[in-house]
Amino acid sequence: MSRFIVRRTLSAIALLFATSVVVFGIFEIIPSYNPARAIAGRNATPTTVQEVSKKFGFDKPFYVQYVNTMKLIFTGQVIDYQDDLNVVDQFKQKFPVTLSLVVPAGILWLTVSILLGSISALRVGKFSDRALMVAAILGVSIPVFLLGALLLYLFAFKLSWFPNTGYTKFGDNPWQWVYHLILPWISIAVLSIGFYSRVLRSNLLDMVNQDFVRTAKAKGLPRQAVFRHHVLRNSLMPIITMFGLDFATLLGGAALVTETIYNLPGIGQYEAQAIGNLDVPPILVGSMFTAFFVVLFGAFSDVLYALLDPRIRLTG
Amino acid sequence: MAERLLDVDDLHVTFVTEDGLVRAVDGVSFTLDRGEVVAIVGESGSGKSVTAMTLMGLTRSPNARFEGSAKLRDQELVTATEEQLEKIRGKEIAMIFQDPISSLSPVQRVGDQIVEQIRAHEKISKAAALDRTVELMERVGIPRARDRARAYPHEFSGGMRQRVMIAMALSLSPSVLIADEPTTALDVTIQAQILREISQLSDESDSGIIFVTHDLGVVADIADRVIVMYAGRVVEQGTLDQIFYDPQHPYTWGLLGSITRVDREPPHRLPAIPGQPPSLLNAPQGCHFRPRCPHAFERCLEVPPLESRVGDAPEHLDRCWLEVSDKRARREVEGRIGLADPSVAA
């Protein structure tokens, strides 16, 4: 176990390094990109721009700039070029919003897809199975920006069942928190529900024909027990890996479309703005943030795998 | 007379496929008494496993059709509801499967898998069920059973895994034990041990055993009565001695002729039955063995009924039109029983 942790930590460091170099490098390559101009303001004179460039070290070679920026990031002093705000503070402030969006959405899509995938597999070939699988295809095909806009138009604008975007802190008013987040949760979950339930269904159908499932039946276990203890349990493995990665990227800010549509001040929205402004520090921190979660949840799902399947040993 | 456990009468199992009907089991009848071992012998695809699994309702599926009757004492199995079958499976009829590697759940401790079966049928505590599991595992010869019950299937050897399967099958002292090629996936030395284990344990518990196999050597070791199946039909059935010393059906001759015997000079080539078993989608008219049988004649286009043809042995049944005396002459090949083309032999 300790070996596993050491190995994963090393690979996390390597991944963070690679991610930061690549992201940083991209902005070296982008033509006519000059952060000094953005900082100096629209009407700045060339001299001012030059001064700013010197002050921020933009005239230094690539690797010096990279090391300086990393120093700022890891000492928590990095500021964005657009608004002169501390990026780490921004992340601290916005992360709870992203958590509020992603964690319940994750629970929602996981439970619903297990439920729908199971129903489909148990009634394979019947009408309910076919209907569910068509719905799943629709769910996978519809882009989040379209689904989000449709839900917003229908349920917030036309029917007024839900508020027209915005966010309330859980601590301020839990009911308002839920009320504001229901549509965003659904928007995020639908795609994954479609995908996960299809994958689960085919896993389940493969598993039903396994010899040990026949043994379970031959033991005289009730149908439900055979399904839950033997079929479902063995079918959930691939879902765990998928969930770990999807969940990690969403926590790292991949929900930027949903956050932007519903005007949720989370990491995704912050990142979307930073990308629009070619604001390097938030983009850099955001990428590293995502990479960190990917490694972390990759390790989580490996541990979970090993717990669920005794044949698997943690080797890192 | 021993108690009658199973009475299978004209059992048909048909699978509806896209290519047509597959008559996997086409009119099988036999009985099983307490304390008896009945072997069902045949090639792959002869319907022997389907017959055995149908008794437990394990072949049920949306595209399977069943006809005829299979009774466990007075309980009809073919038309039984799933709930009725759940009570019978594992408790009244238990099964040992061919492949002990894939037949155990890879993610549960073996002890828990046996406990699960006991607790599906009896209201006892987990601890009590585990005690019984450990006892069972000791009985089938698993050393350090208390520790091993906590191990996972992949931590066992093939032979030990099959012992776990046997312990599981015997856990509720079933009256009928179905063993579906239980030794096929094992080494020869382990085979002998497992066979001894099964026959000894069944003697102790006085259950009836259905032993499905393609291995006549195993049959000679263990069976009281033998049913020979070919392409979904029973072609011959009788006592072990009748089948081995006075076989009536050319297919049985072929099976017996293709065994290597250590007490005879080895033949140049191991005799094999020519040709392939027929596709059950498109079975030959009349006797199913006709296309491969060197003794076939016009009458074989008619299906021979399964009936007693040997005068002094009413329980010895076969499906072959040849006269008994003719059969006894034709099956002699180089001083032993075999299947040979009479025109070539002469």
Image: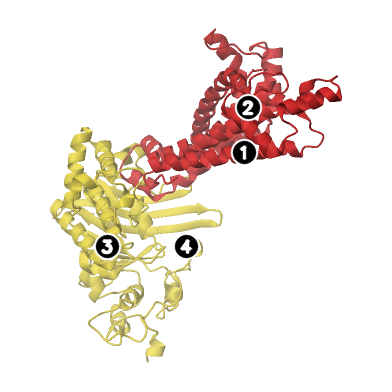
B248 lies above or below A285: below
A113 lies above or below B131: above
- Are the two marked residues, 1 and 3, in contact with CB atoms closer than 8 angstroms? no
> Which residue occupies 64% across, 18% down?
A264
- Under mark 4, the amino acid is Leu
Please indicate, yes or no, whether residue B223 appears anywhere in the rendered image: no
Please indicate, yes or no, whether residue B74 appears anywhere in the rendered image: yes
Q: Position of residue B331 (x, y in %)?
A: 31, 81
**Front of the two marks 4 and 2:** 2
Are the residues under badges 3 and 4 in a single subunit? yes
Q: Colour of chain B?
A: yellow
**Front of the two marks 4 and 1:** 1
What is the spatial separation of the Cα atoms under label 3 and label 4, in whole angstroms?
Answer: 22 Å
- Under mark 3, the amino acid is Ala
Q: Which residue is mark 4?
A: B280
- Under mark 1, the amino acid is Thr
What is the spatial separation of the Cα atoms under label 4 and label 2, in whole angstroms?
Answer: 57 Å
Q: Which residue is mark 1?
A: A19
Question: Could you tell whether B91 is left or right of B68 in the image?
Answer: left
**Nearer-the-camera pick, B166 or B275:** B166
**Front of the two marks 3 and 4:** 3
Q: Which residue is mark 3?
A: B39
